[in-house]
Image (cartoon, helix red, strand yellow):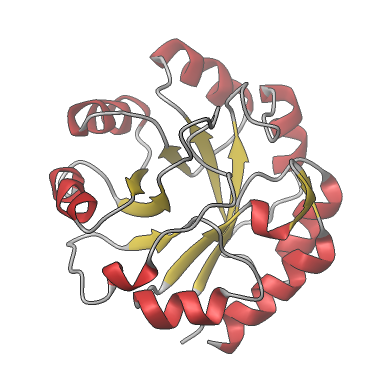
Amino acid sequence: MPVLAKICGLTDDAAVEAAVQHGADMLGFVFFPASPRNLSAEQAEALLREVPSGIDRVGVFVDPETDFLDRILAKARLDLLQLHGDETPERCRAISIYFGLPIIKAIKVSSKADLKAAKAYEDAVDWLMFDAAPPKDATRPGGNAASFDWSIMQGAKFNRPWLLSGGLTPENLSLAVQQSGASAVDVSSGVESAPGKKDPARIRAFLDAARRL
């Protein structure tokens, strides 16, 4: 079966159109001021109008306060919330209950020990995401073009579906899936021409690569 693919950090109509046209399963929209992919609620609202039903709209947040989520969700119709900060399992569960939306929890990975830490989230969230731990000088937890040793994922078992993220590109996607055993993947910087600027041609190449797996 083709690998499920999420294109994250979309900021303009051309990128959304490319992701939709070429078969993305999930689209990610970032609400985090430190990111070059950050959107206002109004910007997201306009982009989300271009997304047809059947494609999941994911809002990406970092340690969000409830009132901030309220303001975004008042404008932006999202299907899932991705939490990419230091949210505890209890906080993830509380957000999911309050807003009635499923949660993707990003787990920062630098060694196999980090996979054990993910177990605490299995009963609190709907999806797990395994992303490379950011460099020490990074100003954001994801979208840093960093990867981790994908082979440590091989054979890992979780009672929730999971996405592989971090440093993926159209060129290395096949190897990443082969080494990790992932059945769902997430890309952001790997389909950009510059930080925060998606390249429609690279989006198409990534999604074509995912379909061939």
Residue at the outermost top position: 67
Up the image or down, 143 lies above or below 181; here it is above
Observer-nearest of 125 and 52:
125
Whole-percent x and y of residue 197?
A: 80, 45
Observer-nearest of 112 and 91:
112
- Looking at the image, can residue 2 be seen? yes
Up the image or down, 172 lies above or below 66; here it is below
Q: Quadrant of residue 26?
A: bottom right
Whole-percent x and y of residue 38?
A: 67, 29
Instruction: Give the side of residue 121 with respect to residue 181, left or right.
Output: left
Observer-nearest of 123 and 187:
187
Image point (36%, 54%), residue name: 130
Residue at the outermost front position: 136
- Looking at the image, can residue 21 be seen? no
Instruction: Give the side of residue 19 with respect to residue 179, left or right.
Output: right
Whole-percent x and y of residue 94?
A: 24, 26
Image point (27%, 55%), residue name: 111
Tally the marks: 0
Whole-percent x and y of residue 48?
A: 69, 42
Image point (44%, 68%), residue name: 184
